[in-house]
Amino acid sequence: MLTIWGRLNSHNVKKVAWFADEIGLPYVRHDVGGAFGMSADYLAKNPNALIPTIEDGDVMLWESNAILRYLAARYALGLWPANPAERAQGDKWMDWQFAFADAQRDAFLQLVRRRPEQRDGQLLATSAAASGVAMKILDRTLAVQPWLSGVAFGVADVPMGVYAHTFFTLDMERPDVPHVRAWYDRLRTRPAYAQSVMIPLT
């Protein structure tokens, strides 16, 4: 059985747990990181001291998007296009997600991890503006296709799907991105998304 190491309030762990739930892949998950710490045994699995890490039989793997691609290739090829060009169109959004995460990080930290009296308003405003600019890029793509994976939901929707929930949940200024909002609303109807992603931000 698949084993996932990582606390579920981590964006990167949410990706892996959601996708496993989405494809009906059984797993056990162990809380690691943050308040749960990291044991020497875990650090032997992932010397980067980051989460998540998975073990699937004789496969040990870290880096969340690499894990998603592995799970799709092994268990859910229908959610990862076989055509190289189509696959690459989705893959680019999986990699683009890291730039978006950088843009949104300070807004998340200020609003979720800081008490009101500790918040830096300038950091928050700058991060909210940067994440809004990035979401407008996503909005233009979702204006012409329903999913980041193309015509149907696929693994490429997972990384930004996790961050979209944070974007629409944080109490911050946001631009009008109707196509991203419609895509997010479609994600919210998926039971696995509700189970692993739509949980309180902490």
Image (spheres, grey):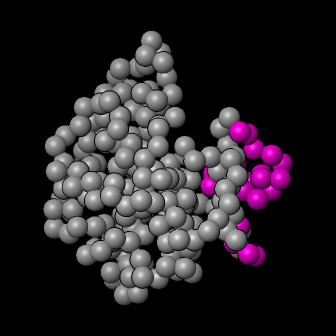
* Residue drawn at 72 percent across, 56 percent down: 46
Q: Please identify the residue farthest to the top as the structure is shown.
A: 117
Queried whether the magenta region covers residue 44, the answer comes back as yes
- Above or below 126: residue 13: below
> For residue 102, which quarter of the picture?
top left
Q: Please identify the residue farthest to the right as the structure is shown.
A: 40
- Above or below 51: residue 129: above
Task: Name the foreground residue: 99 vs 72.
Answer: 72
Task: Name the foreground residue: 20 vs 72.
Answer: 20
| Left or right of 133 in this view: 42 | right
Queried whether the magenta region covers residue 33, the answer comes back as no
Q: Residue 8: percent from the left, percent from the top?
A: 57, 47
Q: Residue 162: percent from the left, percent from the top?
A: 42, 52
From this viewpoint, is residue 82 visible?
Answer: yes
Q: Across the whole image, how many numbered discs are drawn on residues?
A: 0
| Left or right of 44 in this view: 65 | left
Q: Residue 106: percent from the left, percent from the top?
A: 43, 33
From this viewpoint, is residue 126 visible?
Answer: no
* Residue drawn at 41 percent across, 20 percent down: 120
* Residue drawn at 37 percent across, 47 percent down: 165
* Residue drawn at 41 percent across, 59 percent down: 191
Q: Please identify the residue farthest to the bottom as the structure is shown.
A: 83
Q: Residue 74: percent from the left, percent from the top?
A: 57, 81
User: Considering the image in quadrants, where does the N terminus appear?
Assistant: bottom right
- Above or below 132: residue 92: below
| Left or right of 188 in this view: 23 | right
The residues colored magenta run 36-58
